[in-house]
């Protein structure tokens, strides 16, 4: 699922590092959401809707 530019990978790595510093490491699902957002595969609203649906349906 890659196809990230070096800048996109750097940005995701920075997010992962920041989250790690806050003791909230990225799980695989969150990493994949970031990749989908960075590559334009999904919009932020699509990802938000998927997360809401996941937590609404348990």
Image (cartoon, grey):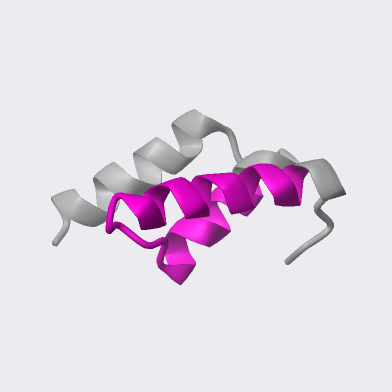
The answer to whether 37 appears left or right of 9 in the picture is: left
Residue 57: name its quadrant: bottom left
The answer to whether 5 appears left or right of 50 in the picture is: right
Q: Nearer the viewer, residue 41 or 38?
A: 38
* Residue at the image position 14 percent from the left and 62 percent from the top: 58
Q: Residue 12: horizontal and vertical position, in percent?
A: 61, 48
- Range of the magenta residues? 8-36
Q: Residue 28: horizontal and vertical position, in percent?
A: 47, 69
Asked if 14 appears above or below 43 in the picture, the reply is: below
Magenta segment: does it hold 23?
A: yes
Q: Quick one: quadrant of the N terminus?
A: bottom right
Residue situated furthest top in the rendering: 45
Asked if 13 appears above or below 44 in the picture, the reply is: below
Q: Is residue 18 visible?
A: yes
The answer to whether 22 appears left or right of 47 in the picture is: left
The answer to whether 43 appears left or right of 10 in the picture is: left
* Residue at the image position 30 percent from the left and 57 percent from the top: 24
Q: Nearer the viewer, residue 19 or 33?
A: 19
Q: Nearer the viewer, residue 15 or 46?
A: 15
* Residue at the image position 52 percent from the left and 45 percent from the top: 15
Q: Residue 53: horizontal and vertical position, in percent?
A: 27, 48
């Amino acid at each position: 699922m890659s196809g990230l530019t070096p800048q996109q990978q750097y940005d995701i790595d920075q997010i992962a590092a920041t989250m790690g510093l806050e003791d909230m490491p990225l799980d695989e699902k969150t990493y994949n959401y970031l990749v989908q957002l960075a590559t334009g595969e999904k919009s932020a609203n699509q990802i938000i809707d998927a997360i809401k649906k996941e937590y609404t349906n348990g």
